[in-house]
Amino acid sequence: MFHLFARPKPCKIMSVLKDTETAWHLSRLAKATDTTYVYVTNLVSKLEEENILTVESRGKKRVVKLTEKGTKIANAIDELRNSLES
């Protein structure tokens, strides 16, 4: 039912990013969400423009973190998913 209201891949990426213990570089994020690297980089660029997440360079790796706004959105996505699945 959830897929009728929200696009699954972006929602999955937002939910995974809530894990602040993990350094989410783009390739790790792609593997964890079963999406392509290209899809993740394009989505991350769009979300960064909207101030939903930040991208920090660490050597050759780019680490993605949710902003406060992004965390609120990710929590709302999870709440919607839980409501629709129960």
Image (cartoon, grey):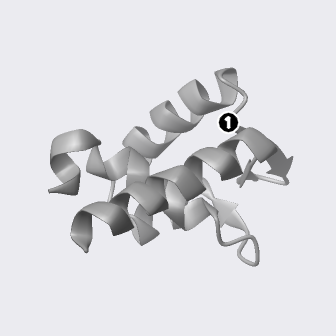
Circle 1: element type? loop
Q: Quadrant of the C terminus?
A: bottom left
Residue 61 appears left or right of 13:
right
* Number of residues whose C-alpha sits closer than 10 Å to that of mark 1, classed few (under 14), some (14–19) or many (20 or more): many
Residue extending farthest top: 49
Q: How many marks?
A: 1
Against 24, residue 37 (above or below) is above
Q: Say which of 66 and 37 sits in front.
A: 66
Q: Position of residue 54 (x, y in %)?
A: 77, 40
Q: Say which of 11 and 82 sits in front.
A: 82
Q: Position of residue 21 (x, y in %)?
A: 76, 78
Against 46, residue 78 (above or below) is below
Q: Which residue is mark 1?
A: 52
Q: Position of residue 35 (x, y in %)?
A: 33, 55
Task: Please name the amino acid that badge 1 sits on.
Answer: Ile
In the image, what residue occupies the spot 84% across and 54% down?
59
Residue 63 appears left or right of 11:
right
In the image, what residue occupies the spot 66% across and 72% down?
19
> From this viewpoint, is residue 34 visible?
no
Q: Position of residue 11 (x, y in %)?
A: 41, 51
Q: Say which of 54 and 2 sits in front.
A: 2
Q: Quadrant of the N terminus?
A: bottom left
Against 22, residue 10 (above or below) is above
In the image, what residue occupies the spot 82% across and 46% down?
56
> From this viewpoint, is residue 33 visible?
yes
Against 21, residue 1 (above or below) is above
Residue extending farthest bottom: 21
In the image, what residue occupies the spot 59% across and 45% down?
73
